[in-house]
Amino acid sequence: MKFLCLACDEVMAFAERQIPGDGTLTAVFRCPGCSREMAMLTNPYETQLVSGLGVCIGGRTVPEQPLELMRTNLEGGRADAFIEEEEAASLPTLAGDVPRGGAQARDPRSRAVAWSPDALTRLERVPSFVRGMVKRIYVDWAQERGIVELTPDVMDKARTELGLEGM
Amino acid sequence: MRQIRTYHEVGPAGASIPEQVAEQQERLSRRLATVRSLVGVASGKGGVGKSALTANLAAVLAAGGYRVGALDADLNGPSLARMLGVSGTRLVVGDEGITPPVGAAGVRVVSMELFQERADAPLRWKGPDADGWVWRNVIETGTLREFLSDVAWGELDVLFVDVAPGTDRIARLLDLIPDPGALMVVTTPSEMARRVVARSLRLVREAGVRRAGLVENMTGWVCPDCGAHTDLFERAGPALDDDAIACWGEIPFDPRLARSTDGGIPFVLSQPEAPAARAIRQLGVRLLEELTP
């Protein structure tokens, strides 16, 4: 979908996304010519339909995570389904036959962004099925902006911008 | 009436959804570039033994030294994780994607069962309680796309995709992978199965799949004492194979096949000399011949 400012005959650019928390979505678009703004409001079905495509209205600001669509939408995800490469490498043995290739190197992103104790406490409240993915998303978002420490305030800002409802 | 520029006449700004969908497709292509042949195993009809056949075929090729993956595309009735012995395994998340667990004979496996807390729970998605039909199919197709593109399959000779029952599910696979290396359509000799499978074959023909073959499963029972063959079903229904879609194999029924495979040990590994195991091995050879340029 695109929005055309009829006064300027210009395509409006995506400006902002808000997740009110009731399944709806608000996306703001702005005319580059006259700066007029309009908000697109989607109902829960429309929100879910777009979410089901694995896309973000207005485009992505951080890379899509592996299995992001499935992990974000599945009800009853297995708590211990995933293990981060870094964590797997630190285990002396791992149940099952998990290949360990490349797992010895620490994820450089984890070292570049620190987590405040409060932020870590909050991260612990995220269901473990998606916790690793959410952590990666926050780190990617912070790195994109040169942020060196993730705090609850920074998480709030990222959550609003990225539409990470309930995370 | 005033002239307003149309969607395609204006620039690329806006919600950027087509660009993101195109990027998803590119990611899928990049991932599958290391897979020599993607082979769909489909039926259209449930209960014909498609998943057990997939697990055994994957295991027999892997045991023969081929690099094999098995993707369980039956999201609502997954079984390959159990059949290939990886239930409960954790999946490693890295920068390259999700590392698939390695099951029987070295087959790399991904199945919805690996992600659900309870193996007996129906598949449920978050979203509006009512009118799930509006978006459910979209999410499940997207999940299948992610299973293909976000899993670090690595270098594979064959990636089997066990397609859920239903002719529409074959269409869904072909939407994602318009030109699979091969597509096997499984049936039993029963009239009802053959009538349903005929629909699937018609779809496969119309889609112009380059290499498609029919596999007749549970063709009969071979007496372990005297070797006599007894048909399980009265052969009836429409003729299914023709010049375009040949019969690639016939697999006899063996109750031990389900017992062994359901227990996580593919029958071709536990009873390699049984007639059904030999037939699956022959089917594997035929498939490799078909895949050879």
Image (tube, rainbow, N blue to C red):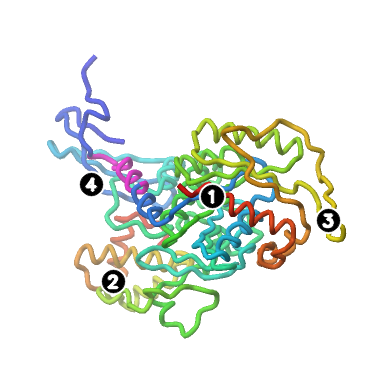
Q: Nearer the viewer, residue B88 or B173?
A: B173
Q: Do callouts 4 and 3 point to residues on the same chain?
A: no
Inspect the image, locate mark 2, and give the three-letter code of the amino acid beneath it.
Arg
Quickly name the residue at label 2. Answer: A109
In the displayed structure image, the side of residue B232 where residue A162 appears, left or right: left
**Marker disc for residue A15:** 4
> Chain letter of disc 2?
A
Say few, some or many: other residues with alpha carbon within 10 Å of mark 3 (under 14 / 14 to 19 / 20 or more). few
Inspect the image, locate mark 3, and give the three-letter code of the amino acid beneath it.
Gly
Say few, some or many: other residues with alpha carbon within 10 Å of mark 1 (under 14 / 14 to 19 / 20 or more). few
Report, in whole angstroms, how far the alpha carbon at label 3 lies from the one at label 1: 29 Å
Q: Nearer the viewer, residue A26 or A95?
A: A95
Quickly name the residue at label 3. Answer: B227
Answer above or below: position of B218 versus A85: above
Report, in whole angstroms, how far the alpha carbon at label 2 lies from the one at label 1: 46 Å
Residue A140 included in the magenta stretch of the image: no
Inspect the image, locate mark 4, and give the three-letter code of the amino acid beneath it.
Ala
- Give the image location of residue B178, x and y in percent: 45, 40
Answer above or below: position of B237 versus B55: above
Q: Give the range drawn in magenta.
A: B13-25
**Marks 2 & 3, CB-CB < 8 Å contact:** no
Inspect the image, locate mark 1, and give the three-letter code of the amino acid beneath it.
Glu
- Give the image location of residue B139, x and y in percent: 48, 47
Quickly name the residue at label 1. Answer: B289
